[in-house]
Amino acid sequence: MKLPFTTEEFLKVFEKYNLAVWPMQYGLYLIAVAAVILAVKTTTYSSKYISLALALLWLWMGIVYHLLFFSTINKAAYGFGLLFIVQGVLFLIQGFFRNQFSFEFKNDIYGFVGTAVILFALIVYPVISYYLGHMYPSSPTFGLPCPTTIFTFGIILWMKNRCPVYVLFIPLLWSVLGFSAVYFLGMHEDSGLLVTGMLTALLIAIKNRKKQIPMPS
């Protein structure tokens, strides 16, 4: 399979995006940090606002990155954008408005692995990207699909209740599609995308079997 764009064109999209939205990258990063804090120091409305944070991140990726920037070199981005928007709407409706999701860090395997995945997305991923020569502004900053999907996996591992399959479907699909960047574009920092996706799917499957709480309708 041959991609309809080159590595240089792909990195140029990052450059155009980063320069156009700056300093929004910091805002997106702060949204992620706020979600982590809310999961560690829970309040009555923590889970609602964590769901809202995830919704904002996925809607941003779908509308701003995919539809406005990535679509300039890859028409498939319109389909990707639609999927990301659907994921954002799911977090918004089911998590924020219907309060169907509950997040909390716990001292168990899910909590520790989730923490490791989140730290990878927020700290390790950009460090690896830097040492691979992907310098700002031609670098995948947080708020772009791959690091943000990895972050989402970490937060999902902190779910207290049973995780519905529909919550994981689109992030897992992107972990497979996005992994193509490793092979075709040399974006080796994205190797963690597929690894964290498969690990999250495995752990969630184990957790769901243990949980007897009915899945949200």
Image (cartoon, rainbow, N blue to C red):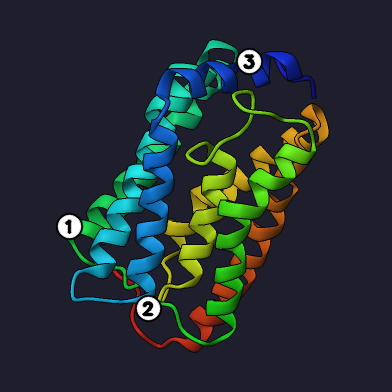
Q: Secondary structure at mark 3?
A: helix
The residue at which mark 1 appears reads as: 97
What is the CA distance from the residue labelled 3 to the residue labelled 2? 41 Å
Mark yes or no: residue 6 visible: no
Q: Give the vertical position of 12 relative to 163 (above or below).
A: above
User: In what quadrant of the picture does the C terminus appear?
Assistant: bottom left
The kind of residue tagged 2 is Asn
The residue at which mark 3 appears reads as: 12
Q: Residues within 10 Å of mark 2 (few under 14, many from 20)?
A: some
The kind of residue tagged 3 is Lys
Q: Give the vertical position of 136 relative to 46 (above or below).
A: above
Q: Give the vertical position of 37 relative to 13 (above or below).
A: below
The kind of residue tagged 1 is Phe
User: In what quadrant of the picture does the N terminus appear?
Assistant: top right
**In-image side of 96 versus 118 (left or right):** left
Q: State which tag comes first along the sequence, 1 or 2.
A: 1
Residue 185: name its quadrant. top right
Mark yes or no: residue 72 visible: yes
The residue at which mark 2 appears reads as: 161
What is the CA distance from the residue labelled 1 to the residue labelled 3? 38 Å
The residue that appears at 52% across and 36% down in the rendered structure is 144
